[in-house]
Amino acid sequence: MNPFVRRVSAEVDGRRIEVINHWFKGCAVQVDDVEVAQSDQKLSLTEEHPLIEVTVDGPSGPLNIDVRILAILFVQIELRVNGRYVAGSRLVKEQEQ
């Protein structure tokens, strides 16, 4: 286990989505083990805006993936798909419907 690497993953609509954050290299999103987006930004101090946003095809329609990271003393990662929380830390309060 590398203390500089943090991973969060979830399976959504039959697709395996993984966020990999490396303290020195930035953040990447993989879908079914293929990198679909990345950011070289190494530090985020706000959870209000996604660090990475990407849309991929899913069996039931598009999957809008956004990754939010809060890093102050330690890294918290939230993985959201189609606007809903799926894995990691809960950084964004869900809107009441």
Image (tube, rainbow, N blue to C red):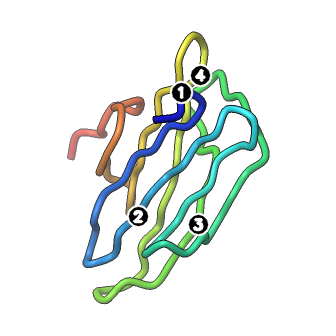
Upstream in sequence: badge 4 or badge 2: 2
Q: Which residue is mark 3?
A: 54
Quarter location, residue 48: top right
Q: Nearer the viewer, mark 4 or mark 3?
A: 4
Distance of label 4 from label 2 (alpha carbons): 21 Å
Q: Which residue is mark 1?
A: 3
Distance of label 4 from label 1 (alpha carbons): 14 Å
Kind of residue at disc 4:
Ala
Kind of residue at disc 2:
Ile
**Element marked by disc 1:** loop
**Element marked by disc 2:** strand
Residue plotted at (35% across, 69% down): 16
Q: Residues within 10 Å of mark 4 (few under 14, many from 20)?
A: some
Residue plotted at (34% across, 75% down): 15
**Element marked by disc 4:** strand
Residue plotted at (65% across, 64% down): 37
Kind of residue at disc 3:
Val
Q: Which residue is mark 2?
A: 17
Q: Which residue is mark 4?
A: 71
Upstream in sequence: badge 1 or badge 3: 1
Quarter location, residue 50: top right
Distance of label 3 from label 2 (alpha carbons): 12 Å
